[in-house]
Amino acid sequence: MIDRAILATARHGYDLLYDPLLNKGTAFTDAERDEFELHGLLPPNVATLEEQVTRRYAAFQATEGDLEKYVFLRGLQDTNETVFYALLVAHLEEMLPIIYTPTVGLGCERFSHLFRKPRGLFLAWPNRHRIESILRNPRFDEVEAIVVTDGERILGLGDQGAGGMGIPIGKLSLYAACGGLHPATTLPILLDVGTDNADRLADPIYVGWRHPRVRGADYDDFVERFVAATAERWPHVVLQWEDFAQANAARLLERYRGRLCTFNDDIQGTAAAVLGALFGAVHVTGVPLIEHRIAVLGAGSAGCGISGLLTAAMVEQGLSPAEAAARLFLVDKGGLLLDGAGTLQPFQAPFARRRETIAGWALEGPTGVSIMDVVINARPTVLIGASGQRGAFSEELVRAMARRVERPVIFPLSNPTTRSEASPAELDAWTDGRAVIGTGSPFPAIIRAGRRFNVDQTNNAYVFPGIGLGAIAVQARSITQGMFMAAAHALAEASPARQNPAANFLPPITELRRVSLDVALAVAARAHVDGVAEPYSDDELLARIRAKVWTPAYRPYRRIRSQAAF
């Protein structure tokens, strides 16, 4: 088992050094070098993990360019995972934007050109009859968390085909760094059903299946085969869906949420992070959640996921479902969602406003109800961006909102940075420093009243590692809406603004590991309340969660020798 004090392995020599989960590099002791035939394969000096981390951090700092730093860290991860995670945990705030958004987007776009060493599984359409046998590999016996994508909607960058594998790799790095899952229990998976990205198809060194995307019944059959094989192989696994296209994301979640413990981070993780952030922002503005009017620009799977959890939270705090719905305004590329529109997707329909509610509005244009129309007529106090459109929060729009609201809450959430609806510096200037700002990607600090103020990053990393950890610890049969609500409340409990309204509404990135533990406890406790896990006392819950938390450190090794050697 992974938590043994002494690790026994038959690997030795170069075979041991080439396994990133087992490799200690120069930290192998003299006794281990004797036992595993490593003398001469390593420099003679025996280093500590701390010395190795110091050496790698100096090399990281000397590397110029974010993409180059990303390549450096991915290379380290593929060489020595213990050093990689010890380095990442020690410098999480600095390195999070490199291994995750926004730099991971560049990594996905350049994936084929950067490809060095396989990580995770590429389940390609031509090998669909081999899925079961591929998953049976004994190397994956310890797997407890899977992040899967088909690469069709990577961040705001669209179809990246096999390059989408960068997202599961990055997400699971955070499961280990923030949630504490052992890397051996995590498995990134890319469902390669082709790509419609002409640039990828034309690239002579593209590593994926060079074919237009498989769609329709064939696509559904492929996903079904994958899910069935996964549920059989790992009955208690947490399966996280990432960056599936709008046409597939919600319906796949609905189809499989009762079959295994699964969630879609773009829909549900984003919602929990945003709700937790809004709970924190309440301490800044002094306005309770149920008194806010919320406009969401971008009514895709993320925007509707956010709206669904916000509605549930308002109902939890005392509003009727109708009252809660009346406080939400979802605007898509065709304008405000209105009932009776033939273009509504099934997941959008619950958020469509009745046409009579806008009968008295003064509208700018003859067709559609724009986001500006919503700001002028509905006077929203919260503006959330999930549009993927840089500049969608224009100066005119933001100033119009600021004229009507004393402390406007504005969350431009689209990733990567190049797709953000507005920058914090712009929002701060256009609202005369009154905006409460939360972004999806990291941005530089702004200057307020002559002082540096760090911008809150409303990042899913605050919640999904803890959600996965809590669900795994109690072997939850599914992940309920109540568990996402519990995650949001746990995040809000960590808000510095609870003690000081002038402080940030989210805890610093440096505290993600602690926050993830708090989220995991809340999620695990709610799993029993919602009937999807066995009952445990508070002490038992804490013990089960702590048993799953790994700290990057070296353990002593013992060599397993075959009978033939004696």
Image (cartoon, rainbow, N blue to C red):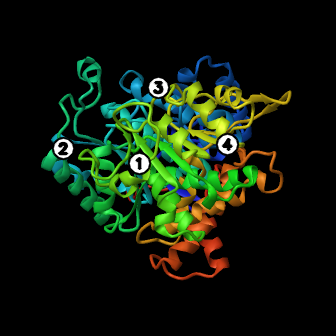
Alpha carbons under labels 3 and 4: distance apart: 37 Å
Q: 421 and 66: which one is in front?
A: 421
Please, what is the three-letter code of the amino acid marked with disc 2?
Asn
Give x and y (percent) for residue 286.
Answer: 74, 54
Alpha carbons under labels 1 and 2: distance apart: 56 Å
Name the quadrant of the C terminus: bottom left
| Residue named by callout 4 | 405
| Residue named by callout 3 | 106
| Residue named by callout 2 | 127
Q: Is residue 357 left or right of residue 62?
A: left
Please, what is the three-letter code of the amino acid marked with disc 3?
Leu
| Residue named by callout 1 | 359
The residue at the point 32 percent across, 53 percent down is 339
Residue mark closest to the camera, 3 vs 4: 4
Q: Quadrant of residue 430?
A: top right
Residue mark closest to the camera, 2 vs 3: 3
Please, what is the three-letter code of the amino acid marked with disc 1?
Ala
Q: Residues within 10 Å of mark 3 (few under 14, many from 20)?
A: some
Q: Is residue 411 left or right of residue 539?
A: left
Q: 82 and 213: which one is in front?
A: 213
